[in-house]
Image: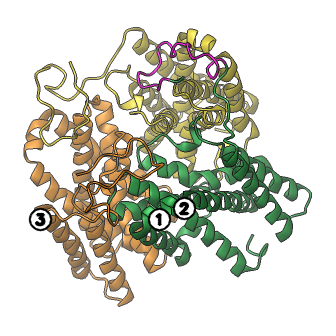
Chain colours: A yellow, B orange, C green
Amino acid sequence: METLFSPPLQHWLDIAGIFVFAVSGALLAVRRNFDVFGIAVLAEVTGLGGGLFRDVVIGAVPPAAFTDLGYFLTPLVATVLVFFLHPEVERINKAVSVFDAAGLGLFCVTGTLKAHEFGLSLTSSVVMGLATAAGGGVLRDVLANEVPSLLRWDREIYAVPAIVGSSAVALLIHLDAVRPETAVGAALLAFVLRLLALRYNWRAPRAWKRSSATADTEAAGGTDNAPTHG
Amino acid sequence: METLFSPPLQHWLDIAGIFVFAVSGALLAVRRNFDVFGIAVLAEVTGLGGGLFRDVVIGAVPPAAFTDLGYFLTPLVATVLVFFLHPEVERINKAVSVFDAAGLGLFCVTGTLKAHEFGLSLTSSVVMGLATAAGGGVLRDVLANEVPSLLRWDREIYAVPAIVGSSAVALLIHLDAVRPETAVGAALLAFVLRLLALRYNWRAPRAWKRSSATADTEAAGGTDNAPTHG
Amino acid sequence: METLFSPPLQHWLDIAGIFVFAVSGALLAVRRNFDVFGIAVLAEVTGLGGGLFRDVVIGAVPPAAFTDLGYFLTPLVATVLVFFLHPEVERINKAVSVFDAAGLGLFCVTGTLKAHEFGLSLTSSVVMGLATAAGGGVLRDVLANEVPSLLRWDREIYAVPAIVGSSAVALLIHLDAVRPETAVGAALLAFVLRLLALRYNWRAPRAWKRSSATADTEAAGGTDNAPTHG
């Protein structure tokens, strides 16, 4: 990975991905009424969490999040921006979604490549690509005490674009065809799929019978806080 | 551990444990109305989370969850099953509890053995056995935004059977008596204790005075979302 | 770090820090009505979680939490104490806050030193100092299904004292002036700042416009469970 793109390009792509993810964390923190440190913590966790999880799992310690000062400072920039300009940032929420989709595309590619570099199989590398792209958002939602958006049926699909992008990278590795232009192609594939999902409200099905029958009784013996659906 | 049971047996026991845990994760996801990817993520996390936590903590990276394709695929099988058959699976909820208890028994044994193999003391290995058996369920509940069942006083005891099973393994290690039949004995001990807890609704006490006095005022200065009890 | 203080002193300072953090975890568990095992788990997680996170991230595995029996037993002592005496402990809640502030001071110092010892940069070591001091509390709140107190604007600042203490240590490292008396000074600095924050209700600002304008509309397109403020 170190040599896939020229180091400055790779670095700036990473920084861009971290930044847009951090903005999404900071915005949620503002909505939840957190203080400025809460905003910074949620920005850091969202921006760096996916890569941190990947690095700890594959044994790449200390993680990149702690060895590159720029990685750490980027979410703080996002914090300052959102702290002062959150109404404006909310207004360009669609632009944020586009950036977030770009982060998704980039992170699933770099996550898959790095996991494979550390000796994981292709399948496991795909899973790590998904975890890198989606992990920060899951940690963000857990810390904000919300059900992770990744898991909810009423949100546009996020996992599919990441899995498709990661799988495309795995295919490239298998074909020994990993080059900057093909890797960018895989990232673009995930990016465009995510944009289409947002544009056309693509949602994944809920469990069989559950998505159609509104009279369906909530699962017997289930938890008492299952949301009603309809 | 590699040589405790014949590798195929060990592998199939692991797969069975992962499967039943994954089913419990998938069922919770259906109750919470998650989409199919949410179901798969919760199945994976519940089935593999305990072992993943153990492996990261003891330094066994990349974790087994990422080096054995079967470990990864098993929760997906559970996802497909629950996706289509969740009403039927709910109906055999008792059977699921029995399988879950079997997973508990197996995982506390293998968790304790693996931790000791990686150089942890006997006490720490017991803790790791408990973490292996209970960790997946805790992660499942955290992701579903629920209070972990492990911690709740209104659920049958889960920690005690796991601690007893893990401690039995520690005793076997201490006595240099770890053999397939004794390890299975320890797993059975945890399994039977858990079944008895479910059958006779064994619950652990809450804090002194809290379990008896219903007129007890909720702790002054406490959180405002403490549940009422009575 | 091993040689900064005489080993027994360092060990007892650590034990004291773990103990007071564990008490805060056990008290929250009692308020949430958990059973005795839930209390023990929350005490362990709160007392050891910050250090565990740090050790896993910097690659110091198995973590100190699993190699020192005293570290593991201390939260159990806190559990027994709180189990029987929780009304009395609640009554001396202020004393608990003082101890907790002492734990904060100590952990941010030892966390920063240990991270630097494992090769992290000064900035990253400061972040690790904060994570060591605050991590256990965040895990405690996540497991109890609450918004982490660290992030909430209506709680006295916790991050600032930890960051100041950690930064003081980084400065000492930079000046090659880490000695028992200077390290204690840094811990005292964090400790006193936290006490002042508690005494004078120092709170950090929320996002711009949000802290002043009560008529501010909740962020458009935001989550539906954002708390009202006013």
Q: Residues within 10 Å of mark 1 (few under 14, many from 20)?
A: few
Q: Position of residue B97 (x, y in %)?
A: 16, 55
Which labelled disc corresponds to residue C119?
Answer: none
Q: Say which residue appears at 57% left-offset and 58% top-offset.
A: C56
Foreground disc of the pair 1, 3: 1
* Residue position marked by numbered label 3 in the rendering: B200
- The residue sitting at 72% across, 44% down in the picture is C160
Note whether C229 is above or below B86 in the view shown. Answer: above
What span is in magenta?
Answer: C209-228
Side (left or right) of C67 relative to B206: right
What main secondary structure does the magenta stretch of the protein show? loop
Above or below: residue B166 compared with residue B72: below
- In the rendering, at what x and y percent does residue A14 appear? 65, 30
Relative to the observer, which residue lies in front, A111 or C155? C155
Return the residue at label 1: C88
User: Given contact means CB atoms under 8 Å apart, are the residues at marks 1 and 2 in contact?
Assistant: yes
Q: Nearer the viewer, residue B84 or B197?
A: B197
